[in-house]
Amino acid sequence: MRSFKTFWLLLLVVMALGWFVVQRSPLQAQTPNPNYSYVNLGALGGQHMYPSDINDFGRIAGSVETEFSAMRAFVWRRGTLSNLGTLGGNQSYGYGINDTGYVVGESTTSNNKRQAFYWREEQMLNLGTLGGNVSTALDVSNGERIVGRSTTSTGDTHAFMWYRNTMTDLGTLGGNYSTANEINDHKVIVGWSTNANGETRACIWKNGTIIDLGIPAVKSYGYAINNNEQVVGMMELSDGQRHAFLWENGVTTDLSAGLNQYSGANDINDAGTIVGFTGDDTTPLAATVWHNGTRLRMGPFSQASTEYQTIATAINEANQIAGYAIVSADGVTRTDGIIWQFED
């Protein structure tokens, strides 16, 4: 299904740009904008919650801090938040969920290795690695094909697909790094890879072949793919700006063309509705929807002494959007999980 796997990187970007904000009141259950509504998903006693994916039945997978400051993979369903546990260690992170409700992610083990897991029927399975010590599962299809990345016996990191107890190395564009971020229902996989020149390139794996999408940028990252083979992600331009992009049939569209802003497209549903975030040096990050040629920044927005930054991570076919709000007060930062309902 649809998922966003780079929230730790994004948090580092937010911190570096000084975009943390102040909140002095809780998130409201409804916004006055007629195009969307939202609710807060709650927590497990800690300060941080990061929804990563949402399936077509509204179940959400992600990572949440417990009252003991440990991060745990979770599933949210109809107002109930469930801790999925670990592979024997103290930390776990949920990244993808399919329509059956099966979840993938990564967890520490009893010997403190970080390895990919598959949670199904109340059991967490260690998927192993490609010969190294570290692996991460990032997405799972409705056909139970799992994609992600793993270290190899040589110390490189390669994208993989796991299916029926077999982990397959998907290779690279000639470099030493690749990651498979998402898989659609037609078994086409999106991600990124380094090439022989060390350049980072958005790519897809289709019919056993890795394909550079040819994004016209210094660096490019493929985050999501829908069943129409539309790809969204982020590209870094020659001037250092990072913009959201849409790739379709060999054509790249810069979703922030002509704008002095930072943006990323994290997911796209089969209707072509894109979600992500936008912001600049003077405007806080806001969860953003691109739909039928228009762009909508979604709240909660700053009011009086209350300020928010929001990021949309995933969207399903019912236009339910998962994401989170970064808030801070008196030097303490909190991250709240949010679900929006977008009305087109």
Image: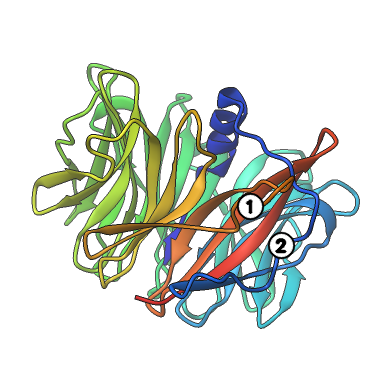
Q: Quadrant of the C terminus?
A: bottom left
- Which of the two labelled residues, at mark 1 and mark 2, occupies the earlier sequence position? 2
Residue 308, compared with residue 235, is above or below; it is below
Kind of residue indicated by mark 1:
Ala
- The image position of residue 69, as x and y in percent, is 85, 46
The picture quadrant where one finds residue 124 is bottom right
Q: Secondary structure at mark 2?
A: loop
Q: Secondary structure at mark 1?
A: strand
Q: Residue furthest right?
A: 68
Horizontal arrangement in the rendering, residue 22 relative to residue 314 (left or right) = right
- The image position of residue 81, as x and y in percent, is 74, 72
Q: Quadrant of the N terminus?
A: bottom left
Work out whether residue 154 or residue 208 is closer to the camera in this orientation and state it: 208
**Given contact means CB atoms under 8 Å apart, are the residues at marks 1 and 2 in contact?**
yes
Horizontal arrangement in the rendering, residue 267 relative to residue 336 (left or right) = left
The picture quadrant where one finds residue 9 is top right
Which residue is rendered at x = 72% and y = 48% of the image? 306
Q: Residue furthest left?
A: 250
- The image position of residue 12, as x and y in percent, is 59, 30
- Residue identifier under label 2: 27
C-alpha span from label 1 to label 2: 9 Å
Could you tell me if residue 97 is visible in this image?
no
- Residue identifier under label 1: 325
